[in-house]
Image (tube, helix red, strand yellow):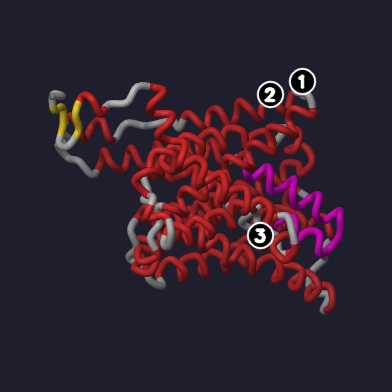
Amino acid sequence: MPTPVSAGVTVAQHPNGWQKAADRLPGLALVAILAAVAIWLGSVGWFASAGISALTVAIVLGIVVGNTLYPRVARAGAGGVTFSKQTLLRLGIILYGLRLTFQDIAHVGIAGVAIDSLVLSSTFVLSWWMGTRLFGMDRETALLIGAGSAICGAAAVMATEPVVRGRAEQVTVAVSTVVVFGTVAIFLYPAIYHFIHRHHLLLMSSASYGIFAGSTIHEVAQVLAAGRSISEDAANTAVITKMVRVMMLAPFLAILSAVLARTAARGNAQPSSGARQSSKIVIPWFAVGFVGVAACNSLGVLPKAAVAAAVTFDTVILAMAMAALGLTTHVSAIRSAGIKPLALAAALFAWLILGGGAINAAVTALLG
């Protein structure tokens, strides 16, 4: 008879490497199917024209299946689903660096980098303050919504989750706000541009519109859709500006980790050894990998075909991670979050348009 080692677990039940891999197969197969469907839907019809990315579709599909069919097979699929939303997620963030080059910075200039920096920092700080002080929300949800609004939507939410140690439902709520207001932005921003030109309110060229859109809209796909509604030049400038903003994800995570560590240390007047451990600064290894991959891509030594294949693979594993997240999210948990997350996201969206517009105008006047 096997010797017990923990509650309900015996030595005989501890799997070796092959057994662990086999245990993950059902869950991996499920999230792979959901990711494939999401990628297909994200490239056709209304989803493509509205700039709704495969990642967004994947989490919605995951939530639908997770609250209907998945509970019946959750025990068999748990290993692969957990592996997808943890390990595959971090690998996906690392490979996301293949979408960037440091040369992108040169295209938007110092003014573009300054605008991105100011919009990012002001939006995130505002989310932290408003979420916890004004709306009385938990800190994790406020930070995740802030990251999604300030940087790059769902990818930023997922990358920030390990740093703030958010729960699946908190991540899903944050991603949902990105979906809602990012989709609104696709149609609202071109309308703002045409309104400004029709009434001669400001001198906004297609390039300056591109910087405004790229520095303030949530998702890359949403930025592209809003840019193309004006012109190809606006779309190109918007995407480059957005990718520079995405590149700020790694330093953002490092700074956030340091700030949270100092906050935790101050919150323990007489910290125990366990508390000291939890308040250490943790530099996310996947953020370092993200910058390293972007640096390699910037050198131009990687074959274009290999980069294209890796980007496609990255889209697949990020979609798998989002599907896995959806599978483990219960609608009741989202419902219990109430109206506050949506109100916070709406306030941030208003800030991105008005405050972001003011930042664009001021920096352009000073440095443009």
Which residue occupies the extreme front position in the image?
1
Q: Residues within 10 Å of mark 3 (few under 14, many from 20)?
A: many
The percent coordinates of residue 288 (x first, y second) are 53, 28
Q: Residues within 10 Å of mark 2 (few under 14, many from 20)?
A: some
Q: Residue at x 38, y 26 (%)?
A: 19
**Which secondary structure dominates the residues rendered in magenta?**
helix
Q: Residue at x 17, y 40 (%)?
A: 269
Q: Amino acid at mark 3?
A: Ile
Q: Are marks 1 and 2 in contact (CB under 8 Å)?
A: yes
In the rendered image, which residue does mark 2 sit on? Answer: 296
N-terminal of the pair, mark 1 or mark 2, is 2
The percent coordinates of residue 361 (x first, y second) are 71, 60
Compared with 341, 1 (above or below) is above
Q: Secondary structure at mark 2?
A: helix
On residue 301, the disc is: 1
In the rendered image, which residue does mark 3 sit on? Answer: 52
Q: Amino acid at mark 1?
A: Val
Q: Please state if 321 lies on the left or on the right of 258 as rendered.
A: right
N-terminal of the pair, mark 3 or mark 1, is 3
Q: Amino acid at mark 2?
A: Cys
